[in-house]
Every structure is written in C-alpha cells, then in structure tokens.
C-alpha cells in the first residue's frame, strides 16, 4: 500500500492552516486524502494578487483549496495526510490526479445560454470521493463509507474557487460551489429489490455540505442548506456531473445483485423458449453482445409489445412506423437488445420489459425503477433515460412489456 515515510503527520503541515484533510498515498492512486477534524481557516491578505505564489499553493505535495475573496484576499484551506481513508477523483481530465475519467453523454444540452453545444459541461476535476479504509484488524464485514465532495484537486494538488465562484464563510469554515455543480440523489428505499423510488436531487458543496438545487444549474445563488442530509453515498446513489451521471453501488449491494453471468443466463433462458416470428415463423435469437444473425434478430412493436423478426409486413407509407400484424396497432419498431450492465439491475427476474425507444431489455422492476428516475437535463429540466445507452425515453411510461410468441411446443 504505502510506506510510512510517504505520509505526513498532522504536525508537519500547516503554515496557513486549516480544515486539515488528510492524505496518504497508495500505489495506484494519486493522493488519498481525507478530512480530519476541522481546525481554523485562515484569511490571507495577499501582498501579491497571485494566490499561486503562496507556499501552500505552490507546493505540489500540499493539498489546498483556495477561496479567492477579492484581488487581495483569499482563504487557503490546507489538507494533511491520514491513513484512514482514500481519495478517488472523478473528472474529464486524463491527468494523473483523476482516477475515473468520464466523457460527456452524447446529446447533453448546454446548461447555460451562451455555452456552445460542443463545449463540455463536465469539469476536468469534477468531484472527489473519500472512502474509509478497511484496516487489516478491522471487521471485514464492516461496510466502508464513501462521501462525495464537489471539485477535485488538480495536478498541483490545488482547488481554486475564483473571485466569481459562489462561496461563503460560516462558523469559520469556507465553502463553495463549482460552476455547473455536482448533484446527488439518494434512492428512497433499498436499491436492491427494486422497491426504492427516486429521492430528491440535491447539490453537494466543495466542503461536502448538502443544499437544495439552485434555480438554474449554474446560477450564482446557492440553494438552501439541508442540515439533516449528508454526502455519504448509499447503494444506488446517483452523482450528476452535468453531462454524465454516475451510479454508486456499494460492495454489499453488488453482492446481492446480478452478475454478468446471471445476465448471460437470462439471455439463454429467452433463447431456450424458442421465440418465433409470427409472420416468418422462424426462430428468433437474442444475441449475447449486440451482434447476431440479421434474420434471427428480435424486433418489438413499442406500442403493443409484440416481438417479431425482420419482415416486410405493415409498412406505413411516408411514416417511420409499422402496423403490428398481430394486433394492427401502428407505432415505432425497434431492435431488442439485452441490457448488459448487471449493476443497473435491481433484481434477478427475467428480461420481460424494454425501454422505449432504444429496445434495451431488463427485468420489469429494473425497467420501471429507471423509467421513473428524473435525470437533471439542461439548466433546470429533467428527463428519463435508459441507463444502458443514455437515450431519453419516449412516450409514457417510456417502456413496453414484451409479448413473445414462445414455448409453443
Ligand atoms: Zn401488436
Ligand atoms: Zn437503451
């Protein structure tokens, strides 16, 4: 893991002060930082207008957050190392301090007027997770705790909140928000079992406090502080980076969830029923990895849910719709594909439902759970989306119950 010499003891730091966070280094991660108990924040009056010249900021080994109050005043909060937690950072940057590099979701609209669609809305150093370590002597059954904070340390181990950033001081603690913000939603209920509902979206600050959402995603006024809520992640918590959303699964939750093998077994069970195309009467095959033989692929009529093969029956002239030969309902048709990421499943049931319009299949409870999660979209809107491909769902309720013609002999 690490050598003792790579760790700082709390006494070694802190010329400037304060909110000690604590860092230690593990072999594959950059700086594993944790928050220790809080001491005081220090207001620095700058003789030079450049906060970069301060020793704690210039020193790469020292992690610090600079809150610039004016051209001549800044508060620098310095963090020190600890061997109880690990820091993991998430962002768009491919530089070393980022452990999980994320890309934008295609088609994400700009959160503010004036920013162009080509410009990413995800910060290069978007957020950081502090995860408690399981020490050798610890009970291995003890769940680890993970907390999320807005903003990540850059390659110089700094976070800067400039003059224009939303920030404030309370009880001697500095805090602030990043430009597009990091939003957090805990499920209301247990993710595993599928009986949970969407919770409320909140914003998490740089210091890990929870606020109601701003009026618009990047407006300068913070929401109201939610003192009885925390930034501790639960199984199924969602972290929205503005352009990509992360799903947090705890190891305890994943142990009670389907695996890749289970998903593949479900594909085999669908195929074992020898589903037939009611028009061509040929046997259809659900492919394992979104490939497959064209003439055996399954298509669903999204209005009625009838599953059929590829055939020429029921084209509607001048429209992108087809008439179902089973029930004569007219609507869109799409290819069926198994949703392959097991962490998105809330139970072990077979894939009886599919999202509209993409045709990704999953269990009924999985599809219903995701179809009713409102994902932040644009400056202040929401949308429902398929977790497997991030396409916006269409129609109400945004999914279809599949009707197979199978198990007929
Ligand atoms: Zn039909
Ligand atoms: Zn999809």
Image (spheres, helix red, strand yellow):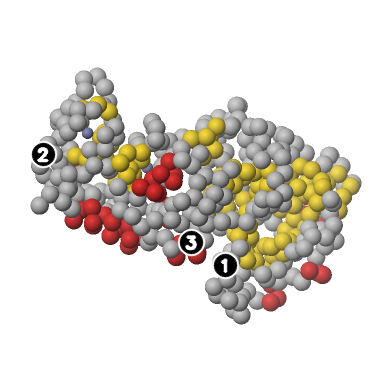
Q: Secondary structure at mark 3?
A: helix
> Which residue is at a point 23% across and 56% down the rendered structure image?
269
Residue, disc 1: 143
**Residue for badge 3:** 253
Q: Earlier in the sequence, mark 1 or mark 2?
A: 1
Mark 3 burial class by Cα count in 10 Å: few <14, some 14-19, many 20+: some
Work out whether residue 123 can be spotted: no
Q: Is residue 60 left or right of residue 109?
A: right
> For the point 39% across and 45% down, which residue is it?
367
The image shows residue 67 at horizontal and vertical percentages of 78, 46
Q: Residues within 10 Å of mark 1 (few under 14, many from 20)?
A: few
Give the mark toward the camera: 2 or 3.
3
Q: Nearer the viewer, residue 355 or 14?
A: 355
Q: CA distance from mark 2 to mark 3?
A: 43 Å
For ligand 2, tell me if the residue under mark 1 lies within 8 Å.
no
In the image, the residue with mark 3 has its CB under 8 Å from the nearest atom of ligand 2: no
Badge 2 density bin: few <14, some 14–19, many ≥20, Cα 10 Å: some
Q: Are marks 2 and 3 in contact (CB under 8 Å)?
A: no
- Residue placed most toward the observer, 56 or 306: 306
Give the alpha-carbon distance from disc 1 to disc 2, as whole Å.
Answer: 53 Å
Label for residue 280?
A: 2
Q: 284 left or right of 394?
A: left
Q: Where is the N terminus found, in terms of image quarters?
A: bottom right
Give the numbered dot on residue 48: none
Residue drawn where x is 70% and y is 76% of the image:
5
Give the quarter the ligand 2 occupies.
Answer: top left
Mark toward the start of the polypeptide (3 vs 1) = 1
- How far from the left and from the top, in percent, is residue 185? 57, 47
Secondary element under disc 2, as helix, strand or loop, is: loop
Mark 2 vs ligand 1: CB below 8 Å: no
The answer to whether marks 1 and 2 mark residues whose Cβ atoms lie closer than 8 Å is: no
Is 126 left or right of 289, judged from the image as shown?
Answer: right
């Amino acid at each position: 893991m690490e050598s003792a010499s790579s760790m700082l003891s709390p006494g070694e730091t802190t010329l400037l002060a304060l909110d000690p966070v604590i860092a230690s280094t593990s072999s594959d991660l950059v700086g594993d930082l944790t928050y220790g108990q809080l001491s005081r924040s220090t207001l620095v009056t700058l003789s030079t207008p450049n906060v970069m010249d301060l020793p704690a900021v210039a020193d790469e080994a020292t992690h610090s957050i600079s809150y610039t109050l004016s051209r001549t005043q800044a508060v620098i909060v310095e963090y020190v190392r600890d061997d109880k937690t690990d820091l993991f950072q998430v962002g768009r940057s491919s530089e070393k301090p980022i452990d999980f590099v994320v890309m934008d979701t295609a088609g994400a609209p700009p959160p503010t007027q004036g920013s162009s669609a080509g410009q990413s809305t995800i910060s290069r150093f978007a957020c950081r997770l502090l995860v408690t370590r399981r020490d050798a002597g610890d009970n291995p059954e003890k769940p680890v705790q993970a907390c999320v904070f807005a903003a990540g340390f850059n390659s110089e181990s700094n976070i800067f909140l400039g003059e224009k950033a939303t920030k404030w001081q309370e009880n001697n603690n500095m805090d602030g928000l990043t430009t597009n913000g990091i939003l957090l939603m805990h499920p209301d209920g247990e993710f595993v079992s599928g009986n949970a509902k969407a919770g409320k979206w909140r914003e998490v600050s740089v210091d890990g406090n929870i606020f109601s959402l701003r009026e618009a995603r990047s407006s300068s006024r913070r929401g109201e502080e939610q003192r009885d809520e925390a930034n501790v992640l639960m199984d199924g918590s969602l972290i929205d980076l503005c352009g990509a959303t992360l799903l947090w699964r705890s190891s305890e939750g994943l142990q009670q969830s389907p695996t890749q093998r289970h998903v593949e077994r479900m594909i085999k069970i669908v195929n074992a029923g020898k589903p037939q195309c009611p028009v061509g009467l040929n046997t259809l095959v659900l492919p394992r990895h979104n490939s497959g033989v064209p003439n055996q692929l399954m298509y669903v009529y999204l209005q009625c849910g009838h599953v059929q093969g590829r055939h020429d029956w029921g084209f509607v002239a001048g429209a992108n719709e087809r008439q179902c030969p089973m029930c004569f309902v007219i609507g869109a048709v799409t290819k069926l594909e198994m949703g392959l990421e097991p962490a998105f499943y809330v139970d072990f049931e077979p894939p009886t439902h599919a999202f509209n319009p993409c045709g990704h299949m999953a269990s009924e409870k999985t599809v219903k759970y995701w179809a009713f999660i409102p994902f932040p979209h644009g400056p202040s809107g929401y949308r429902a989306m398929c977790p497997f491909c991030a396409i916006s769902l269409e129609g109400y309720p945004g999914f279809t119950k599949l009707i197979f013609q199978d198990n007929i002999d």
